[in-house]
Image (cartoon, helix red, strand yellow):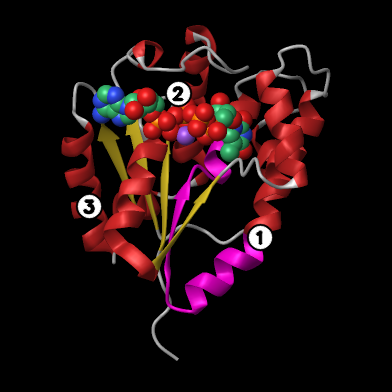
Amino acid sequence: MGPRGRLILIEGLDRTGKSTQAELLACELGSNSVLLKFPDRTTPVGQLIDDYLKNRHNPLPDQAIHLLFSANRWEAARRIESALFAGKHVILDRYVYSGAAYSCAKNVPGMDMKWCLDPERGLIKPDFTIFFMNNGHESEQRAGFGDERYETVQFQDRVKHTFLELFETWENASYRENNMRFLNVANKSITEVALEVKQIAEKCI
Ligand code: T5A
Ligand code: NA
C-alpha cells in the first residue's frame, strides 16, 4: 500500500474565492486528487440545506439546520477516508469550522461552541487548513453576495470573529502554527492567490 494522501481544507468567509481556488488546486494536483465541497447540495440532505439557504422564509429551526450541515459531512466521511487511504489528496471546500462558526455566530441560546462542535466529533481532521480572509467588507462587492441567507455584512463580521475564536479555543498552538495558514486575499487576483495556495499545498504534500 502506498502513502496516505493529504487532507487539505480551504476555509474562510463568504465570497473570498474558496471554491475558485479549491477547483484550481484540484486541477493542479490532477487525477491524484479529489475535490469535495460543503455543503454538498447534490445529496438529499444537501437539497434541504440548499432550500434553507436560498429561501429566507424556510422555518427550519437553527438546531435542525446545524445538524443537517453536519450530517452532510458525515454522508461523505467514508468517501473521504477511502480516497485518502487510496493515496489520493482530498481538497475540501469548507468543513467543520464553517459548521461551527456560522451556527455559533447566530447567538442562539444553548448553541454555544461546544454544542456546535459536538456533532462533528469523529470526522477526520484536515492535515492542513488554509483560511481565506480579506479586509473588512470586500466580499460584498463580489458577484452573488447577498443572494443567500447568511450574506449580510453584520452577520459576516460576527462569523469572522467566531472563526477566530474557534481556532483560538479549539485548536492548540501547534496545529495553528504547523497546520494552518491565514491567507489575506484582499486585492489579490485569482492568479496571485492560486500561486500562494499552490506553494502552501506543495509544502504540505
Ligand atoms: N455554511 C456552510 C454553514 O452555515 N454551515 C456549514 O457547515 C457549511 C459547510 C453556503 C453557506 O452555508 C454556510 C456558509 C455559507 O454562508 P457555500 O455553498 O460554500 O456555503 O457558499 P457559496 O455560495 O459557494 O459561496 P462562498 O461564499 O463560499 O464563495 P467562495 O467560494 O468563497 O467564492 P467563489 O470562489 O465562489 O467566488 C465568488 C466570486 O468572486 C470571484 C469569483 O469569480 C466569483 O464571482 N472571485 C474573485 N474576484 C476578484 N478577485 C479574486 N481573487 C477572486 N476570487 C474569486
Ligand atoms: Na464556495
Given the current orientation, which residue lies at the most extreme bottom position? 1
Residue 184, image quadrant: top left
Q: Position of residue 76 (x, y in %)?
A: 64, 58
Q: Which of 60 and 169 is in front in this view?
A: 60
Report the side of 204 relative to 118 (left or right): left
The residue labelled by disc 1 is 122
Residue 138 - label: none
Q: Which of 196 and 100 is in front in this view?
A: 196
Q: Does the magenta stretch include residue 139?
A: no
In the rendered image, the vertical position of residue 94 relative to residue 8, given as above or below: above
Q: Is residue 87 magenta?
A: yes
Q: Is mark 3 on a helix, strand or loop?
A: helix
Residue 35 in view: yes
Q: Where is residue 20 in the image (x, y as percent from the top left)?
A: 36, 38
Mark 2 crowd level (few <14, some 14–19, many ≥20, 10 Å Cα)? some
The residue labelled by disc 2 is 160
Determine the quadrant in which ligand 1 lies.
Answer: top left
Specify the quadrant that holds the N terminus: bottom left
Q: Classify mark 2 as within 8 Å of ligand 1 or not, answering yes or no.
A: no
Highlighted range, magenta: 77-100
Mark 1 crowd level (few <14, some 14–19, many ≥20, 10 Å Cα)? few
At 76% from the left edge and 43% from the top edge, which residue is drawn?
A: 45
Q: Where is residue 189 in the image (x, y as percent from the top left)?
A: 19, 29
At 35% from the left edge and 32% from the top edge, which residue is drawn?
A: 17
Mark 3 crowd level (few <14, some 14–19, many ≥20, 10 Å Cα)? some
